[in-house]
Amino acid sequence: MAQTDFSLPEGTHTVVMGLGDLNGILRGKRIPASHWKTICREGNAYSNVLFAMDMTCDVWDTPYGNFENGYPDFHMFPLTKPVAIPWEEGVAICFARAEGMDHKPVPIDPRQVLLRQVERAATMGIEVNVGCELEFYLLDPETKLPRDKGIGVYGLDRAAELEHVLGPIRRQINEVGIPIEQSNPEYAAGQVEVNIRYGDALEAADHVVLFRSLVKQIAHAHGYLATFMAKPFLKESGNGFHCHYSLWQGDKNIFADGGTLSETGRHFVGGLQKRMAEASICGVPTPNGYRRRTPFSFCPINNSWGGDNRTVGLRAIEGSDKATRIEKRDAGADANPYFLLATDIAAGLDGIEGQIEPSPRTVGSGYKTAEADPIPTDLATAIGLARSSDWLKNVIGGDQYEIMMQQSERELDFLGQQVTDVERDRYLGNF
């Protein structure tokens, strides 16, 4: 949440300040402590291209920033109080907010998309809480392959083998202010999952942006390459981004009804189901991400929902009133959390306002149910659905929507123009 005290920890000589770009990648600058008071008062200037470039920093003309208007500046101001980075003596880090030269929010700042839905929920008397679970790989930086072998999911021996890097990730990211609940080895060599404790939706998305950057920094310090790429290895488990939603009015979780999902929670599911396919691009914006969506992979291929069932797209976790929630399981770990959470919340609130009933609960395998609608399993289909969705364009916002769509279209076109080693191995000597 926004702070007013931006004083530096004692002994700070450098401040790292950044925010999430078009892809939710943390970008910013390192600032001498001697210049910090000026930054707090006047801001720090950046080109608005920061919000309109792809993950490789490639730039193209967009409706908001282009060669005609010269990619003008915006300013970053601190949003959170700087905290010491445990692995860099004398260095502190803080999250930033974007402000245009007109002193208004930057229209293509992805954070604004989520802020609008959080404010909408507030007008309904609702606070949205989200818990984020992210999977990633720890790889050898030279070979780009895991150093361990075999599947060690939940294995405490594998966890101990990785503790020299996962221990610092848990502890030091906690020290920076992101509440980490737990970590565990996942369903492939080198793959792990770390869970961030639930909290306010906007803060949860900010935490994801900062978390991914800090994981990569800590991994690098320990001789690893960390990647949140959705599907780095075709025959191994993909990296997911699971979101656990609950809605609160005061101290009451309105998804809970005596140990079961309430009518409000059911309508939230109905809204999610209705928009899951056309908003797919917000959770999976690249061709690679759709390689996760295969049957029997623990990644959903439809909008089925059910109880404690990891084969469905929407999992209702029931029990105590405090813990009752909806888990949405389709996004990749490389998704922009602002777009993902904003469209999920918008769809769920629509469901509540429209009293949308979901399909019957799926009992058994979600991959076999005939009562669920498919969600895209390739980027071309996702782009087509998103392009035809006035709802999505309205939630994201005109220029922001167009930039997001253009990036995914560019990615699809780029990958379509490549001849791969696999193609050469298969065809070159046989035709």
Image (cartoon, rainbow, N blue to C red):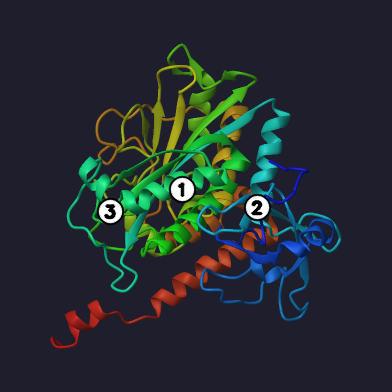
Q: Mark 2 and 3 residues: CB-CB less than 8 Å, in contact?
A: no
Q: Which residue is mark 1?
A: 277
Q: Which is nearer the eye, 20 or 223? A: 223
* Amino acid at circle 1: Ala
Placement of 418 over or under 376, stated as above or below: below
Q: Which residue is mark 3?
A: 237
Judge left or right: residue 413 versus residue 300. right
Q: Earlier in the sequence, mark 1 or mark 3?
A: 3
Judge left or right: residue 51 versus residue 384. right
* Amino acid at circle 2: Phe
Q: Which residue is mark 2?
A: 95
> Residue 389 placed where, x, y %?
57, 52
Quarter occupied by residue 397: bottom right
Placement of 122 over or under 284, stated as above or below: above
**Which residue is located at x 45 percent, y 77 percent?**
414
**Which residue is located at x 49 percent, y 32 percent?**
270
Labels 1, 3: front one: 3
> Residue 316 placed where, x, y %?
41, 28
